[in-house]
Image: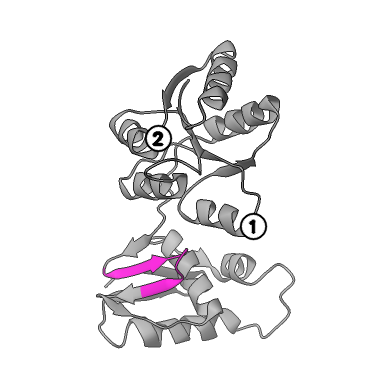
Amino acid sequence: MRVLLVEDEIKMSRAIRRGLEREGYAVDAALDGKDGLHRAIEWDYDAVVLDVMLPGLDGIEVCRRLRLAGRWAPVLMLTARDGVADRINGLDVGADDYLVKPFAFGELLARLRALVRRGARERPAVLKVGDLVLDPAAHVVTLSGRSVPLSTREFALLEFLMRNAGQVVSRSAILEHVWDYNYDGMSNVVDVYVGYLRRKLEQPLGQVRIRTVRGVGYGLEPA
């Protein structure tokens, strides 16, 4: 397994590299964000261990650019920050896991093994279907370049449909992912909110279509 380590603290970098090599990993190391981004785009890795606080490009920006470039190797972010907002930022730009310094090497190794088993799945930071664009981190939706104001629940529903674009998802799956298992409100809530989205997405420009499959559910696709 080949791992890219992007860490600017030389002692930390050497310690992690030696530990990983003892476990049989092939390790390439970069000391700044620019070099790390270049390596991660140019070569294939089974995983990337990426520090947040880097000179030049920080780890958040490296991860964001990596995903925008279509590179989907699992990313484990390292940080001295333990604030929730920092972890959210990392995950929103496409990181797969977060480890706060100081940490036990055994935990890093276990998390890395889990990410490698999971493999490189496409996880775009920004979702696109035709001219419809949804940015989960910024909580912004645009259609043909125009902003589309959505409520929190409308946004969640649209994000779920876009992550499953081209497929038909059942009402029960939508309820499970957008509401929760124990939702006990009106039984037609999914249909109501699909109607809200249709009015905002289909009627103005006709660029996106939410298809109804009777007895099954809904699917999102370009018009």
In the depicted structure, whether residue 212 falls above or below residue 121: below
Q: Secondary structure at mark 2?
A: loop
User: Does the segment drawn in magenta span residue 138?
Assistant: yes
Q: Secondary structure at mark 1?
A: helix
Is residue 215 visible to the viewer in this orientation of the structure?
A: no
The residue to which callout 2 is attached is 32
Q: Is residue 57 left or right of residue 136?
A: left
Q: CA distance from mark 2 to mark 1?
A: 24 Å
User: Does the segment drawn in magenta span residue 27?
Assistant: no
Q: Which numbered disc flags the more N-terminal residue, 2 or 1?
A: 2
Q: Dot 2, how many residues are within 10 Å of its Cα: few (below 14), some (14-19), or many (20+)?
A: many
Q: Dot 1, how many residues are within 10 Å of its Cα: few (below 14), some (14-19), or many (20+)?
A: few
Q: Residue at x 34, y 33 (%)?
A: 35
**What x and y, as percent, mark residue 119?**
49, 34
Q: Residue at x 43, y 24 (%)?
A: 29
Q: Amino acid at mark 2?
A: Asp
Q: Amino acid at mark 1?
A: Val
**What x and y, as percent, mark residue 197?**
43, 82
Q: Residue at x 35, y 40 (%)?
A: 71
Give the residues in magenta.
131-141
Q: Nearer the viewer, residue 14 or 22?
A: 14
Q: Which is more foreground, mark 2 or mark 1?
A: 2
**What x and y, as percent, mark residue 156?**
52, 71
Residue 161 placement: quadrant: bottom left
**What x and y, as percent, mark residue 44?**
35, 28
Q: Residue at x 58, y 30 (%)?
A: 112
Residue 127 placement: quadrant: bottom left
Whether pointer 2 and pointer 1 mark residues with C-beta atoms closer than 8 Å, the reply is no
Q: Quadrant of the C terminus?
A: bottom left
The residue to which callout 1 is attached is 84
